[in-house]
Amino acid sequence: MPSVVGLLEQHELAARRRVDGLREEADRIQAELAAAELEWQEWAIARRRVDTVLAPDDGAAAEAEVTADPRDAEVQSTLRDAAKPKSQVPVWHQGLAWSVLSVDYQRILTALADRARLHQGPLTCQEMAAVFGMEVVPARVEALRSKAKRLVARGWLAEQQPGRFTLAAGVTGPGDGS
């Protein structure tokens, strides 16, 4: 029969091993947490930069501060996403004037209305950038593509072929009140 002291030493050794294992796991989790927080902050910064590039109002986006508390981030996100005048694209319906859209969206519609009037067919975003006198670089083309896709989703434009945009059926020139 083992001695009481021997049994206590075995239990103590088992408890020490468990404590050491848990400390190692806690250190690993702490390091993983620090890496995840850093990654989260980097993605938040990247999202803000993309928001700035794609912002429909002359590239000026509301600044959202990177915070350590996720609840603060939700509040900042809500404030940043609040509608700015003419920044949202309403769903198109008969009689809706182009003036409800920002100048950037009106410019896209005007270019496509001119193409339709001249029976020239759809435009790609690269062609739009060239028509607008923009430098045809990926950032500009993607900003236009984002706006065109938003107009498609709201019924202002049609995209019968991927990446080729035309006015949607029923949408006419800006002077016609629709």
Image (cartoon, helix red, strand yellow):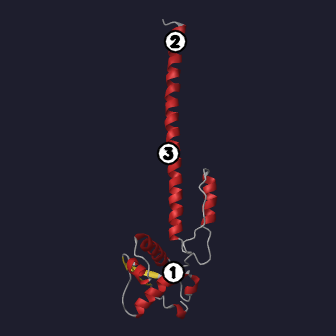
- In terms of secondary structure, where does tag 2 sit? helix
Alpha carbon of mark 3 to alpha carbon of mark 1: how far? 40 Å
- Image vertical order of residue 141 relative to residue 32, above or below: below
Which element type, helix, strand or loop, lies under badge 1?
Answer: helix
Viewer-proximal residue among 45 and 25: 45
Q: Position of residue 47 (x, y in %)?
A: 51, 61
**Which element type, helix, strand or loop, lies under badge 3?**
helix
Reading the image, the residue beneath label 1 is: 105
Residue depicted at x 49% and y 91% = 173
> Residue 22 appears at what percent x and percent y?
51, 30
Whole-number angstrom distance, CA of label 3 to CA of label 2: 42 Å
- The residue shown at (53%, 48%) is 37
| Label 1 environment density (alpha carbons within 10 Å; few <14, some 14–19, many ≥20) | many
Q: Find out whether the residues at labels 1 and 2 contact each other: C-beta distance under 8 Å.
A: no
Amino acid marked by disc 3: Ala
Q: Earlier in the sequence, mark 3 or mark 1?
A: 3
- Residue type marked 2: Leu
**Circle 1: residue type:** Tyr
| Pointer 3 residue | 35
Q: Position of residue 147 (x, y in %)?
A: 48, 75
Q: Which residue is mark 2?
A: 7
86 or 167: which is nearer to us?
Answer: 86
C-alpha gap between disc 1 and disc 2: 80 Å
Q: Residue at x 62, y 73 (%)?
A: 84
Label 3 crowd (10 A; few <14 / some 14-19 / many >=20)? few
Q: How many marks?
A: 3
| Pair 3/2: label in front | 3
Q: Nearer the viewer, mark 1 or mark 2?
A: 1
Mark earlier in primary sequence (3, 2): 2
Checking the image for residue 94, the label placed there is: none
Q: Quadrant of residue 98?
A: bottom right
